[in-house]
Image (tube, rainbow, N blue to C red):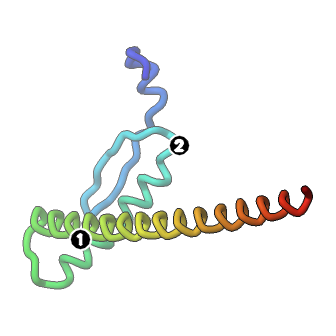
Amino acid sequence: MSGNDKDTDKELARVSVRILDKEFMIACPYEQRSALLDSAQYLDTKMREVRESGKVVGIDRIAVIAALNLTNELLRLQSRDQQLETELGGRVRALRERIDGAVARSQQLDL
């Protein structure tokens, strides 16, 4: 990252997002604009779901509940990914052992 503010300004895009009918101007790297808009839309949807449940009143509380729900979702997905990586690692090790065994047998036959 450059210490020159002019260089930094050129790399950032100002993006307008609307969440629960409020507009926010967000600066982000130009190449991440689409991801920011998708994230804002997803957050808006989740906050509307919380508000429409009728159980939570107040924008701050809606935001906190939506953030907790999203964090829970993220943690569950990370845990699932970790389990899948562990399972795949075990499968790859087992396949490698089978291949090593087959190569060793093949080499013995060649002798």
Q: Quadrant of residue 12?
A: top left
Residue occupied by mark 1: 69
Which residue of the protein is positioned furthest toward the front in this rendering?
A: 111
The residue positioned 18% from the left and 84% from the top of the image is 53
Contact? badges 1 and 2 (CB < 8 Å): no
Q: Quadrant of residue 17?
A: bottom left
Pick the front one: 4 or 19: 4
Which numbered dot is residue 21?
none
Q: Distance between the residues labelled 1 and 2?
A: 28 Å
Check disc 1 and give the amino acid type: Asn
Quadrant that contains the C terminus: bottom right
The residue positioned 65% from the left and 67% from the top of the image is 95
Quadrant that contains the N terminus: top left
User: Callout 2: 10 Å neighbours few (<14), some, many (20+)?
Assistant: few
Residue occupied by mark 2: 31
Say which label, 1 or 2, has the lower sequence index.
Answer: 2
Pick the front one: 71 or 40: 71
**For residue 63, side relative to residue 93 (left or right):** left
Q: In this view, does 25 lie above or below 105?
A: above
Query: x, y percentage for residue 93?
Result: 58, 62
User: Callout 1: 10 Å neighbours few (<14), some, many (20+)?
Assistant: some
Q: Which of marks 1 and 2 is in front?
A: 1
